[in-house]
Image (cartoon, helix red, strand yellow):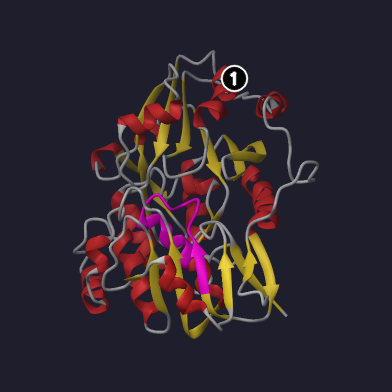
Amino acid sequence: MRKLYDTIEKYALREGSDIIQPVFPRIGQLIKKTPISKTGEKAVIVVPDHTRPLKTSLVLKPILEELSDFKVVKVLFATGTHKMSNKDARSLLDDMDVEYKIHDAWNEDEHVRIGTTKRGFNMFIDKEYVNADVKILVGVVVPHPWAGFSGGAKLILPGISSASTINEHHINWFLHERSKAGILEGNVFREEIEEAARLAGVDYSLNIVTVKDTIVYSSWTKGLSSFKECVNVASRIFLKPIPKRKYDIVIADARPFDMNLYQATKAIDHAKLVIDRGGTIILVCECINGYGGIKEYLDMDERDIVEGLNNRAFRNLVPPLVALTLRKLQKSVKLYIVSPNISGGNIFEKIDLQELYGIIRNKKVLLLKFAGVTVPKIFS
């Protein structure tokens, strides 16, 4: 029987792999090798919000033990412009006895200006972080469609930045030619993020690489060098070389970012790297939490989105920016969606599995598994 499709996915981890490292008590051992020597009364640990695959309580435990002499230790959830509830926070903390704050990008009074980047970009971040004596970032490093990779300085921008700061950063740099998954060098979107972290100051960082729900690599350092170390590992896991060819159809399985449609669009950013003009991307996602705040923008045409962005008419510019990229892509690629919780609309045509089989017959098809983090890279 003829094979109907090619398949790629992230690195298939096996026991004994040189990538896997024992994590617990590994993180604690890493911290003991580079202990927190800076003193003071207050420490703030910035951690990802509930949209990132991290067992937060397990990661925090060895850090909190190292900070036991501090009078005040606070966990700050880096939400960017995402919505997060106290229930979400308590679930991630597993009811740990630790003080926490959910970053609120919309409360401008909670932010202070920390300076201006070399490109003249004003930075406002959460004053809880600014006022800390010891500043620690905890990041998850996986490919990101604009920033190259998540984690590292991204905990500062957009993580704990004001809404106005996030909006201006995204609208200025998200369409830059190097603002792509897996790319750091020459990526202005990322460079401004790194500049923001330099202005904010980072004393220590723990960056982690996860596959599914398993931590496979971790690095703890002074400053942010742990990020680069984890990028090297994440690149081997998530950036997948394929022969120099493009496909008629890419089926993009949006896991692990399939909790809502807004997050699931990361899979489309990765799929479009290997789709032929006039081809088809089929997004497969559960989206148990629905649209994730993007639905109203999907129903708008490109002209109205651009006008609203230029006039700063939207409170949060990030979802309409995502919708705009989809509108632009729609000019050259057909977009379908298979999901029990999304009804389709002006951008996506909804199909079921039986219709899917009919569409892919006799076509060059790529099945991109875990497309939320798997990035196909064409080589000659």
Q: At label 1, which amino acid type do we have?
A: Glu
The quarter of the displayed image where residue 148 is located: bottom right
Image location of residue 48, percent across then percent down: 46, 40
Up-down relation of residue 300 to residue 207 (above or below): below
In depth, the one of 291 and 191 nearer the eye is 291
* Location of the N terminus (image quadrant): bottom right
The quarter of the displayed image where residue 130 is located: top left
Is residue 254 on the magenta stretch?
A: yes
Image location of residue 212, percent across then percent down: 57, 45
Residue under the point 80% across and 45% down: 18
In depth, the one of 156 and 201 nearer the eye is 156
Residue under the point 69% across and 50% down: 233
Look at the image and give the residue range highlighted in magenta. Answer: 250-268
Is residue 129 on the magenta stretch?
A: no
**Which residue, given by chain and number where applicable, does mark 1 sit on?**
66
Residue under the point 57% across and 67% down: 367
In depth, the one of 173 and 198 nearer the eye is 173
Q: Is residue 188 left or right of residue 324?
A: right
Image location of residue 176, percent across then percent down: 46, 72
